[in-house]
């Protein structure tokens, strides 16, 4: 039996070759990898760098966008975190902190001036003092994480309702990774259409991104099939040196209770078996919050920095006002 066949039979198997090789400081997360940003931005990503004695000590990526003459920068699609990558060098904690502030300030100074700029910081950014000093506003958004531990400890820390959902999902589904990007996108489109909804993400980027992640050995599909061999739910996870991230999911409208929880549990076991934090990312609905917390996850803050001109703020306020007044139910 090959290692690939072994993985398909046991999706929770720990395979060392699936983990990425050590990366330089410039890629603190998978979302900072040049190949990731090239795919998600269709080659439009740009960056600024800070150098010391001709050595790169800081780098910050950004995505320039122009619409109706307004230049702005926001997060690329499918990219959970960005923010500066800093190498403060050796020294005491205070020395490294001061150096980080100095490098960050240099990067900020080199960012192009536009009408608006917004980014969500990665876990390595523990404060945004340099951004605040440069006139940025700061916000906090929460992600949901599970730290590496043995499976029984994590299982015991879940809500009873979540454990029951997982049991139900595992009882009525086969959990496998036998899915490719084309199959996932086709399944995703079918589910969106069956639910009477419209696609809200660029699925061509998703196709290319999942394929590249598989090639880089930084990504994996997990699929739930029913007793008739029909696809009922699927997720895609990615990872870097520190964390495994829940990136995408889809499920059939007639999927039974527990399909997604069972897939998430398989993903969590894979992550912690490899010593990785499992990151659910932020949640945009009460249902998602309850689902993530049901696994015993811990809420962890992530900074968001943003800066915009007065004219941009007024234009955004005007657009919101017009949107609200055009809705007779508001």
Image (cartoon, rainbow, N blue to C red):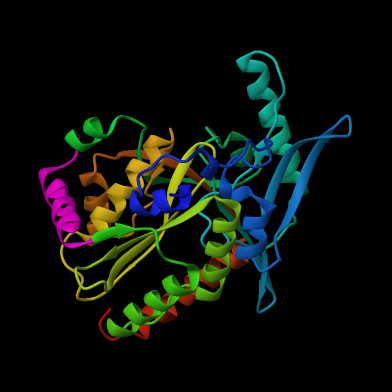
Specify whether residue 196 is in view.
no
Residue 221 relative to residue 95: left or right: left
Type of secondary structure dominating the magenta stretch? helix
- Percent from the top left, x then y, of residue 239? 50, 46
Residue 318, compared with residue 121, is above or below; it is below
Magenta segment: 157-173
Specify whether residue 37 is in view.
yes
Front-most of residues 151 and 57: 151
Quick check: is 168 in the magenta stretch?
yes
Front-most of residues 223 and 327: 223
Question: Seen from this angle, which residue lies furthest right?
Answer: 54
Residue 193, compared with residue 230, is above or below; it is below
Residue appearing at x 40%, y 49% in the figure: 6
Residue appearing at x 16%, y 67% in the figure: 256
- Percent from the top left, x then y, of residue 208? 58, 68
- Location of the C terminus by quadrant is bottom left
Quick check: is 10 in the magenta stretch?
no
Residue 320 relative to residue 233: left or right: right
């Amino acid at each position: 039996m090959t290692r690939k066949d072994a993985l398909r039979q046991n999706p929770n198997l720990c395979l060392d070759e699936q983990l990425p090789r050590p990366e330089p400081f410039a890629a603190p997360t998978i979302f900072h990898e040049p190949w990731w940003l090239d795919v998600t931005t269709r080659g439009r990503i740009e960056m600024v760098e800070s150098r010391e004695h001709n050595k790169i000590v800081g780098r910050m990526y950004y995505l320039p966008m122009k619409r109706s003459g307004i230049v702005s920068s926001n997060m690329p699609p499918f990219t959970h975190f960005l923010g500066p990558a800093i190498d403060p060098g050796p020294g005491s904690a205070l020395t490294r902190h001061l150096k980080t502030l100095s490098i960050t300030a240099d990067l900020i100074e080199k960012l192009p001036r536009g009408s608006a700029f917004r980014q969500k910081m990665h876990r390595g950014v523990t404060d945004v003092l340099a951004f605040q000093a440069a006139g940025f506003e700061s916000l906090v958004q929460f992600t949901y994480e599970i730290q590496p531990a043995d499976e029984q400890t994590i299982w015991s820390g879940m809500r009873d309702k979540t454990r029951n959902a997982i049991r139900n999902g595992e009882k009525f589904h086969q959990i496998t990774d036998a899915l490719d990007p084309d199959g996932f996108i086709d399944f995703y489109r079918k589910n969106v259409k069956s639910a009477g909804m419209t696609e809200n993400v660029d699925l061509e980027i998703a196709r290319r991104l999942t394929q590249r992640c598989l090639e880089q050995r930084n990504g994996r599909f997990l699929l739930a099939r029913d007793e008739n061999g029909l696809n009922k739910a699927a997720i895609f996870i990615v990872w870097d040196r520190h964390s495994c991230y829940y990136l995408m999911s889809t499920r059939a409208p007639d999927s039974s209770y527990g399909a997604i929880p069972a897939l998430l549990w398989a993903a969590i076991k894979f992550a912690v078996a490899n010593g990785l934090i499992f990151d659910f990312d932020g949640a945009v609905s009460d249902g998602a919050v309850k689902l993530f917390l049901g696994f015993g996850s811990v809420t962890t803050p992530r900074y968001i920095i943003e800066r915009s001109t007065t004219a941009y703020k007024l234009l955004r306020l005007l657009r919101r006002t017009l949107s609200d007044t055009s809705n007779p139910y508001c």
